[in-house]
Amino acid sequence: MKSKLSYRHTLRASYIGYITQAAVNNFSPLLFVMFNSVFGLSMLRISSLITVNFGIQLLIDLISAFFIDRLGYKRSAVIAHFSAFAGMTLFGILPVIWADKYLALLIPTVFNAIGGGLCEVIVSPIVEACPTENKSGNMSLLHSSYCWGQLGVILVSTLFFKTAGEEKWNILAMLIALIPLFNAFYFMFVPVNTLTPDGSGLGIRELLKTKAVYVFLLMMVCAGASEIAMSQWASAFAESGLHVNKAVGDLIGPAMFAAFMGVSRVLHAALSEKLNLDRFILFCSVLCLVCYITVAFSGSAAISLAACAVTGFSVGIMWPGVYSLAADKIRNGGIVMFSLLALAGDFGCISGPSLVGVISSSFGNDFKRGFLFSVIFPLGLIIGVILLRKVTTNERQAEKLF
């Protein structure tokens, strides 16, 4: 039977898909200090969970270009959500019944990573392929749903821990698992287009002949690292580095980070037709650089938490902005281009928080040192915007010659 749902429902399912990704990426970081104190896991082991999560997402990005077109966008989205459902459910069960707490956290992390990785690769092309106007604005709205999902996870978690107790965190994990379960069935019934229905999308070899793609890959690495380095460690930094109450730290640190990031993306969606996208990315990259430096050197807990929050605004446009620029500059890139961009972004998601974790651990869990070293990421994005202008200018001049 033909579905009666419209592309508005496709957009809604896609938004929930990014909420799902936000949930699987951001729920466990709220519990890092508890994993350290109650389960006895070192910060290096906890950091390795982040590495495994984004490492598997990176692997999914790498191989997805070879199977998603064959498997289909819709089927891939459904599989992604069932995997996330399994991950969050196991996350709520295994640590309670297994003595090996690290392994009990590692297995759900794998399932979550598969689900989150597939969501990341497939949802943006689904939105890009919808027959709608203002695609740049829609892309920013899509990525803003990740922020609202992250914010929702933090607020709900804080309320839940205050009422039920932090020791009941596993129950909340299984409740969150209902989100991807619902969306798996939702995606079964919405209409889904493909970016290149005639199979004419550029292949990897063709893409790699385009100079601009290397600049976009650099920008995606730096975008992912700039965003995740702060979001993954903000809660632990507030608790152990600034010595504030967990509820206060979560609400003012990662919660405000997510809120400001969402505002940035909604603002771009509303003004996308008036804003110069690469200039806005450049401005936000400079702001991000200033925020990281402030966190690293400020002696005030209030100023450091405020800088964490403003970092959210500064990174908000980075990921969706680079996606939109790439879709505009490299036409017919198809799922292969989005897979490569997601691959680069997830490499940044690994390198950013891993660098913070390793450096911080080397200096006695001093997160300020870790954040100081992370300034290389917004700096790299600034360099990327400058290089992109040069590359696109040279390509326009070359076209005039022919």
Image (cartoon, rainbow, N blue to C red):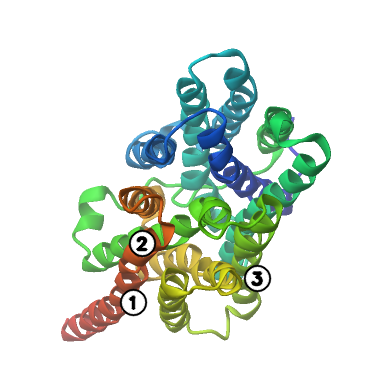
Q: Nearer the viewer, residue 110 or 203?
A: 110
* Residue occupied by mark 3: 263
* Residue occupied by mark 1: 382
Q: CA distance from mark 3 to mark 1?
A: 22 Å
In the rendered image, the quadrant that contains the C terminus is bottom left
Residue 135 at x, y percent in the picture:
56, 67
Q: How many marks?
A: 3
- The image shows residue 393, relative to residue 196, as above or below, that is below
* Residue occupied by mark 2: 369
* Mark positioned earlier in the residue sequence (1 or 2): 2
- Label 1's element? helix
Residue 376 at x, y percent in the picture:
30, 67
* Residue appearing at x 47%, y 70% in the figure: 295
Cβ atoms under marks 1 and 2 closer than 8 Å: no
Q: Nearer the observer, disc 2 or disc 3?
A: 2
Residue 363 located left or right of residue 186: left
Q: Nearer the viewer, residue 255 or 174?
A: 255
Residue 239 at x, y percent in the picture:
58, 52
* Residue appearing at x 26%, y 56% in the figure: 207
* Mark positioned earlier in the residue sequence (3 or 1): 3
Q: CA distance from mark 1 to mark 2?
A: 22 Å
Q: Nearer the observer, disc 1 or disc 2?
A: 2
